[in-house]
Image (spheres, helix red, strand yellow):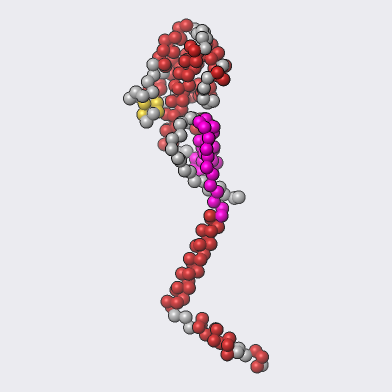
Amino acid sequence: MADFLPTRSVLKVCLPFCVLSNAEADQIRKSKEIDKGLNREKTHVKRLVKILLLGAGESGKSTFLKQMRIIHGDDFDAKAREDFRSTIYSNVIKGIRVLVDAREKLHIPWGDPNNQPHGDKVMAFDTRSAKMVNGQVDRQVFYEYVVAIKALWADSGIQNAYDRRREFQLGESVKYFLDNLDRLCEANYLPSQQDILLARKPTKGIHEDNFEIRNI
């Protein structure tokens, strides 16, 4: 039986832990909580991936971020979609102006000479006017140009200019929006996810977005 009795040295180790005061026990508990928190933070940092997107205009930086937001974020609420609607209207007017200007510089004749006034109308649009709201085109302002834009996009001269778009700079999404002009003009129009992905707005400064990717 003597072999199973605790030695005096063992008792000296055990006794201090058996008679801890409430304050000491509380300190140990808090210390363990802090350790657990640090371990959780360490695990989080290990799983954190930072990506820096750099590139020239129209290289796809904003499109990538929008795709990540749609897939892994909170998508776009009604307010965000309304903001993109103005961006899309701006893209359409800018795009048709580029095509009208290119038609003239490339010496492409009008398919219908009666469309010249429509061309003059869109070229007279002042991007710095009070009609612009934060650099974007308001819905009512856009409606003033819809008839002219439709006539111009249907003109063979503008179509010929579009076919030669490699000779000048034109946004890749211009054709998509011009082909969907009727939908863009609907009273209750809100941009779809595809519309948002193709909308182009110059990026200024540095923007940071956070996404949580689950199940990986």
6 vs 50: above or below: below
Work out which quarter of the rendered image holds the N terminus and state it: bottom right
- Horizontal and vertical percent for residue 61? 52, 36
* 55 is higher (above) or lower (below) than 149: below
Q: Quadrant of residue 167?
A: top right
Q: Is residue 119 magenta?
A: no
Q: Residue at x 46, y 69 (%)?
A: 30
Question: Which is more toward the observer, 200 or 191?
Answer: 200
Q: Is residue 68 above or below residue 95?
A: below
- Farthest residue in the bottom direction? 2
Q: Vertical placement of 69 versus 56: above or below?
A: below
Residue at image position (49%, 12%) is 105
Residue 68 on the magenta span: yes
* Residue farthest left in this picture: 130
Residue drawn at x 40%, y 26% is 137
Q: Which sits in the foreground, 119 or 196? A: 119
For the question of whether residue 47 can be seen, the reply is yes
The image shows residue 210 at horizontal and vertical percentages of: 49, 46
Residue name at image x 48 percent, y 11 percent: 104
Residue lying furthest top: 113
- Residue 122 at what x, y percent from top left? 42, 16
Q: Is residue 1 left or right of residue 208?
A: right
Q: Which residues are magenta?
A: 46-75
Numbered marks: total: 0
Examine the rendering and report whether any part of residue 154 can be seen: no
